[in-house]
Each structure stands twice: as structure tokens, then as C-alpha cells.
Amino acid sequence: MSGRDHPFTQPPAWDGDSSDPNDEQFGDVIFPATLETAAEERAVLVGEPYDGAVLGRPGASEGPAALRRELAATKTHHFDAGPVRSVGDLGDIAAIAGEWTTMRSSEVQATVRDVAASIYDRGALPVFLGGDNSLTYANVAPLVERGSVGVVSFDAHLDCREVRGEPTSGTPYRQLHEAGLDAFAVAGARHFETSTEYAEYVTGRGGTIVTADEVGMDTVTAADRLREAMASVDTVYLSLDMDVLDATAAPGVSAPTPGGLTTRELYRLVRLLATDDRVAGFEVVECAPPLDESDRTVRAGARAVAHFLSALTARADWEASDG
């Protein structure tokens, strides 16, 4: 078989590390998957170990392995939704695992875009473990080709710079708009972290900006504004840049800054939005373990994945009860 038929590295062996037999952890419910079996799972993990296009400090290429490690040791039970059920792991995208240093960022985007398209073609719901924010374009672009799509970006920044030469972690939403993105909303944007021109670009394109201050004042109202921004689209994609969190909660990112969301605010937003049956994908980007302190950023990112997967479980239960 060709590399195109098997575009992933072998997934790691998952196992919970608790000595208590009553402790079900994500390591006990995540199993290797293939493209052929991916649609059978509620969601599939996909590693994207790449940070060749980052504008700030590198380190996010080590994010997928660290997020998996921390998630494996996290318990599956949510008090409202109950335990998370079976999840698949496709492994890392093989073409960029260890090879990206010889590739231009546009080549990496093209490669990842093809792999992401193959996942959506199977009817699977991917959870991409990044990696830098430049890959958001590649993860979302195949959805844009299939119909009306909106992205909710949890991010301190707007990431809508023009591409000058090669794409960067600051260009994905400009690229997606040029590809035909229908709706865009940013949650957790930070004062004094963007240029006026880019703020006006987003609002001029009909985008919604919900600042970190607004999330902190009323998380539910913030979620309502984000949902309203997605009202006209058929498909929704959720992107989590770990720098949306305050620097005290997530020091291990390319550009940590003060004034960000708390982990509690972030998780509530993720859950409120992930229960929407239009959500077709989720990603965690800019988690850089070499820059972290006491694994705070990795732990926060893994818990965000856990909350997303738990919300999918709740969504499936509601759909089953309605049916």
C-alpha cells in the first residue's frame, strides 16, 4: 500500500496509569484507529507535530505527544455527562512527523489538507493535536469545499495577517476567508494584542470578536454571541489556540500574555459550543511543552480535549433519546 493509503504513523499504546481498578482513564478508552474504522468512533485523534511556521517561540511540534500523555492519565468521568466512551487515535500525520524541517510551510499545509480531506471523506470527526496555528487552514479548508462553514477560534489573536511569501501561524484565517469561509468568530481576544487594521478586517468581513473581558463578565452570554455568529452556516469548526488562556494558566505557548481566559471559562465555552450537532472538528494548537512550567499548559490542553469529547458523548445521548 502507498503512503497515501496509510498517511499516519502507528498510534501510541494507550493505557491508564492508575493502580485503582475503579479509575477509568482516557488511556483505557482510546484505541488505535484507521481511516477505514474512523467513522465508527465518536471522534478520532490526529497528531500534527509541526511548528515550522510559528511567528513566536517554537516548541509546539512536541504538543501531540505531550497532550496524549496527559490525556491518557485523565479520568473519563464528567459529573453531568458521565464517562466518555470509545475514542480512536489515527496517529500522527506521517508526512510531517520528523520530515517537516525540509518542507516549506505551504507544502506542509497542502499535505495536511489532503490528509484532513481523507478523514472528512470517511465521515469521521477529527480532533487535531497540534502543532502551530498555520495548520488551521489545512484542517478547515476541506470543509469549506463541502458547503457553508464557520470557525469559532479561541485565541488571544486574530491570525488574519496577509500571506507574504510563505504562510505562518498568523495567516490561517486570511487564507480561509480567501478560500470561502462563511463565518468567523474569535473568543478570548486580548486588548493590545492586535493591530487596528486586523480588527477592522475581521469586523469588515462580518466576523465577531468576543474579548477575554466579555467572556469573564458573562460566559453564557459570550457563548450565545458565538452561536449567533454561526447561525447561518451548516458546519462549525472549533479551534483552540492555547494562548487564549492567561499566561499564568498556559505559560507553554508561543506568545503568552496576561489578561486571558481562565481554564474554567474556556471549558465552559467549549462544552456549550461542542454540543451543537453541526460541529465537525476540533483542534488544539500552540501547545509547546518545552516552554511549559510544571506541565500546566499541557494539562490544560488535555482537559480541553476531555471536555470536548465529553460534550460529544452528551450530544450523542441526547440524539439517541430524541430518536
Image: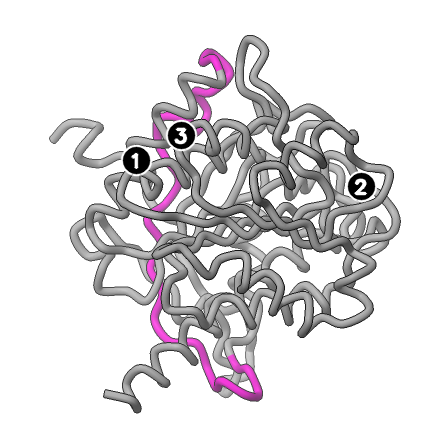
Q: Are marks 2 and 3 in contact (CB under 8 Å)?
A: no
* Magenta range: 77-104
Please name the amino acid that badge 3 sits on: Ala
The percent position of residue 122, horizontal first and vertical second, equals 20, 50
300 left or right of 126? right
Confirm whether the magenta stretch covers residue 85: yes
Rendered image: mark on residue 256: 2
The residue lying toward the viewer, choosing from 236 and 48, is 236
Q: Earlier in the sequence, mark 1 or mark 2?
A: 1
Label 3 – label 1 distance at C-alpha: 18 Å
Q: Are marks 1 and 2 in contact (CB under 8 Å)?
A: no
> Mark 3 falls on what kind of element?
helix
The percent position of residue 45, horizontal first and vertical second, equals 40, 53
Label 3 crowd (10 A; few <14 / some 14-19 / many >=20)? some
Name the image quarter holding residue 171.
Answer: top right
Q: Earlier in the sequence, mark 3 or mark 1?
A: 1
Please name the amino acid that badge 2 sits on: Pro
> Mark 1 falls on what kind of element?
helix
Label 1 crowd (10 A; few <14 / some 14-19 / many >=20)? many
Rendered image: mark on residue 260: none
For disc 1, the marked residue is 115
For disc 3, the marked residue is 179
Q: Residue at x 46, y 33 (%)?
A: 176
Label 2 crowd (10 A; few <14 / some 14-19 / many >=20)? many
Question: Which residue occupies the extreme left position in the image?
Answer: 1
Q: Residue at x 42, y 25 (%)?
A: 109
